Image (cartoon, rainbow, N blue to C red):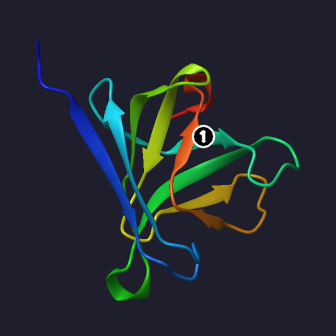
Amino acid sequence: MPAPRFVTVLVEANPGCPEECALRFKAEDEPHPVRRVRYDADGDGVRECGVTGWSSEQGGTATPAMAVTIEDSSVGVAVLIWGGDWGLRLAPIDGSTPFGEPYLRIAPDDVLE
């Protein structure tokens, strides 16, 4: 039986995510890049968003966002999306203001690209 693999999400407090985050998740498959998701950011309804990782380099630069399937006790499985040391930057495709999140835990069907 292969040894379990884990993903550690470490996000420093920054302008897009004012609270730091340190979490560890058990990966169920191989991480892969992701660029577009459906996400309910603030309870105002689901929006389609471009997603990138966000790094502290040069005061904020894009890095790849990564996705991996994880166990979720409430729904069985979910997809973890994580990025750089400043978390994620989500840009709604409707042109709304981009916003930051430390990470996302979403349903597999909400990963679009």
Residue 73, given in percent of the width and then of the height, sits at 54, 24
Residue shown at 55%/40% (left/top)? 105
The residue under label 1 is which amino acid type?
Val
Residue 35 in the image: state x and y as whole percent. Answer: 49, 45
x 57%, y 72%: residue: 17
Q: Residue at x 76, y 61 (%)?
A: 95
**Count of marks, rendered view:** 1
* Residue at the farthest bottom position: 59
Label 1: which secondary element: strand
Instruction: Residue 66: name its quadrant.
Output: top left
Quadrant of residue 60 in the image?
A: bottom left
Q: Within 10 angstroms of label 1, few (less than 14), some, or many (20 or more) residues?
A: many
Nearest the eye: 60 or 27: 27
Residue placed most toward the observer, 88 or 6: 6
Name the quarter where the N terminus is drawn. Answer: top left
The residue where tag 1 is placed is 37
